Structure formats: C-alpha cells, structure tokens
Amino acid sequence: MGNLNLQTLPRPVRGNQYEIELHPDWEVWGPNGGYLSSILLRAVGLHANKDVPVSYCGHYLRVPAFGLAQITVDCVKDGKQAAAFQVQLRQSDNLMTQALVWVCNQGSGLSHQLLPKPTHWLPLEQAGPRPPAGKMRFWQNLEIRGVKNSDGHYSHWYRFAADMDWEDPFADAARSLILIDSMQWPARYYKDVTPPLYVAPSLDLYVQFHRFSPRSHWLFSDALSMSAAHGLVGGGAMVWNDEGQLLASGGSQSLLRAVASPY
C-alpha cells in the first residue's frame, strides 16, 4: 500500500528543480494521473511563498515509467495575494506532464456553500462494505465504504492508506486531485452489466480547491461520467468531507482505447 504523503513529495535539487521516484504502488495503466498531478501540485507548494492551492489545470502528454523523474517549477505571475506557476515533469528529457497552478494567501471575505450535498450522500457510519474495485495496484491504496449509486454516479467514502493529519494544504489537496482524476472512469465502466472493452487514459485534469479539511480522514467523492462520444469520455467529480462541506470540484476528458479483454 502506498503512502500518499511520502510518495507525492518531491526532493529539492537546486533552485526551481526537484526530483522524485515514481512509485509502482500507484499503477493503473501506468502511473495514475491523479498521482502525477499530486506530485506537481506539491512541488509548487514547496516552491511557492503562498499559503494554499487555488486551482490546478494539467495535461498528461506521455505516460512516464516508474522510476526517477525531474520536476521544474517556474513562476509566471507573482502578486501580493496570489501567484501562478507552471510546473513540468520530465523523464530522459521528455516532457510527460505539465500544469498551471494558482496559489494564494488565505484571506477573509465571503463564506457560503450554496451547492447542497448529493442526494445519495450518506453519513460514513451508514455506508456499506467495500464495492468491487479494479485489480490494479492503485486500488490497494484506498479503504472504501460503499454508497448506493444511481443515475451514473460513482460515489463512495475513501480513506487513503497510511492516513494522517494532512496539515499541509498542498498534501491535503492531493487527496482530492487523485479522487477527481480517478473516479470518473469507474462511473462509466461500472454502469454496464457487461464491462466495455476499453481503457480511458486521461488527457487533462482541472480542479478547483474550495476548502481544506486536514482532520477529515474519510472523504466522500461523487463522480459522474457525463458524456461519451467521438472516442472521448468526459466527466466531473466533487469531494466532500464528513461534515458535508465541499472541498474540491473538477473534471477531465479521457481518450478511449480498445483492449483485447476486460480488466
């Protein structure tokens, strides 16, 4: 089982350069996209002089191998309250993943949540046993409690292995990145009685971070595969804490690829 806190934290090398060993605990069809995005986000957290992440917009350009990878972080806009960074992950001089990340200092102002909890949101103590999950190593990193799904939603409670208090907001946000990136395809895959013979590697990922909940070990992810057409699958997801507060929301597009047998 993977330790999300340790396995997403890059090592400083010099200046704006970082490195990390991509760990096979996060294997899907290669390194999980949300795992890669979490590494990029945390590299920005190490480099930036701001308190919290605001948003993440990433593109998965190539599939890296498990092993050493290099990360570069560049500030493209630095303001008193907010700053924007470009971050890139490379292997053997090949650009694998890149993202734009906004960060800011925490301030005061409006505070509201107009979006209600999903209608199938259940308190953790009412959730059922773990639902069926894939055979890939990625799923071993999650403890899952089942919720009754409907209308194409794939919504459960999740706790990461080796969980802890996520006092670093960038580490806390990494959990939401992984859930939003990863649970949209199962929302489509598990919709049918007979699984489709496809994989769906993510092309991109966009996430807004609304709140941080470092003491919430369990997170509720509500994912929906909203559309599939022209060889693409688009979806969205939201992450909530155990008090029903919205922590993050986002979505991605994935590219369908036929495979010889179901997985």
Image (tube, helix red, strand yellow):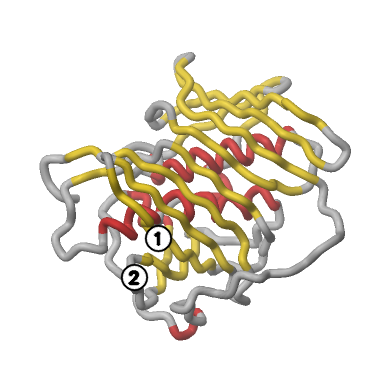
Q: Residue at x 46, y 65 (%)?
A: 222
Task: Name the residue at the left extreme.
Answer: 260
Residues tagged 1 and 2 counted as in contact (Cβ below 8 A):
yes
Task: Name the residue at the bottom extreme.
Answer: 126
Q: Nearer the viewer, residue 56 or 5?
A: 56
5 left or right of 21 in image: right
Task: Name the residue at the top extreme.
Answer: 93
The residue carrying mark 2 is: 151
How packed mark 1 is, by other alpha carbons closer than 10 Å (few <14, some 14-19, many 20 or more), is: many
Q: Secondary structure at mark 1?
A: strand
Q: Nearer the viewer, residue 22 or 259?
A: 259
Mark sitting on residue 191: none
Q: Residue at x 66, y 71 (%)?
A: 114
Estimate the spatial distance between the alpha carbons at disc 1 and disc 2, rounded to whole Å: 9 Å
The residue carrying mark 1 is: 224
Q: Nearer the viewer, residue 86 or 5?
A: 86
Q: Secondary structure at mark 2?
A: loop
Q: Amino acid at mark 1?
A: Leu
211 left or right of 32 in image: right
